[in-house]
Amino acid sequence: MNFIKNNLANAFTLGNLFSGCVGIVHLISGDYQTTAICIIISLVLDFFDGFIARAMNSSSNLGGQLDSLADMVSFGFLPGVAMMKMLEPFGNQLFGIELPFEIKYFGFLITLFSCLRLAIFNLDDDQKYYFKGLNTPSNTILIFGIYYLTQVPLPENLEFLFGENLTNVHFFPSLLSLILITILSSWLPISPIKMIAMKFKSKQLKDNYPKLALLIGGILILLIFKTVGIPLIIIYYILISLIFQKQLK
């Protein structure tokens, strides 16, 4: 019984890692739908491994290390591959300049800085009720959300924004925008910006305004924008965290 208690959370963590590996394989082969399912599974398992460890009082240094290693694959390597896929069509051309390598490998900058963010997080004892910098799961949702929009037609209910019929219209970001997104999503995870964490320090309503604003706003964005709302939620998350900077502690 003690063995199960001590290792149940670790089993969830390893499940997160397995799901991330499967998601990457399908992402490389172009099966974005299976990858999306794998990311959702990894997100759920990543949430519950910590929850179970705290509930069963089975937290350990091993569990913390396993969690970071699993996140490195599911929320570090996977978004790097997603950005690589988006940069792939541009070959080795950078604004008319022929490079000695394909520009797609620039996408792995996200992976490198995700690794750095996880290492910093492991050594930081302050991030109990907030995150310092954008956490890797959110960064993954942002990058894969943008990639997902390049694979599916834009929702027809957004015609009022674009002023045209959106039937079978896809989103195709420019090379410049992808490079800027890569740089931004590499910096945000290691930035000093305090980000909202869905961990409740108290039951007082005033202490939880940032979390409620994030939750309600996120639901509304999804209802209105549907698939387009996936990356928009992360942008909203960043903006609402900036607004409530002084309350995050």
Image (cartoon, rainbow, N blue to C red):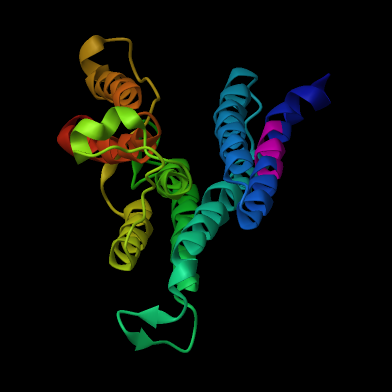
Percent of width and height locating residue 144: 47, 47
Total marks shown come to: 0
Look at the picture and state if 97 lies above or below 158.
below
**Front-most of residues 27 and 20:** 27
Considering the whole magenta stretch, tell me its main secondary structure.
Answer: helix
Percent of width and height locating residue 211: 30, 23
Can residue 70 be seen here? Answer: yes
Residue 147 in magenta? no
**Front-most of residues 203 and 141:** 141
Q: Residue at x 47, y 68 (%)?
A: 89
Can residue 225 be seen here? Answer: no
Question: Which quadrant of the view contains residue 18?
Answer: top right
Q: Which residues are magenta?
A: 12-18
Percent of width and height locating residue 174: 31, 63
Look at the picture and state if 178 lies above or below 238.
below
**Front-most of residues 58 and 66:** 66
Percent of width and height locating residue 96: 31, 84
Quadrant (top left, top right, bottom left, bottom right) of the N terminus: top right
Left or right of 190 in this view: 76? right
Q: Residue at x 80, y 24 (%)?
A: 4
Question: Which quadrant of the view contains residue 7?
Answer: top right
Look at the picture and state if 154 lies above or below 206.
below
Q: Residue at x 29, y 18 (%)?
A: 216
Quadrant (top left, top right, bottom left, bottom right) of the C terminus: top left
**Front-most of residues 241 and 181:** 181
Look at the picture and state if 13 lies above or below 202.
below
Left or right of 168 in this view: 63? right
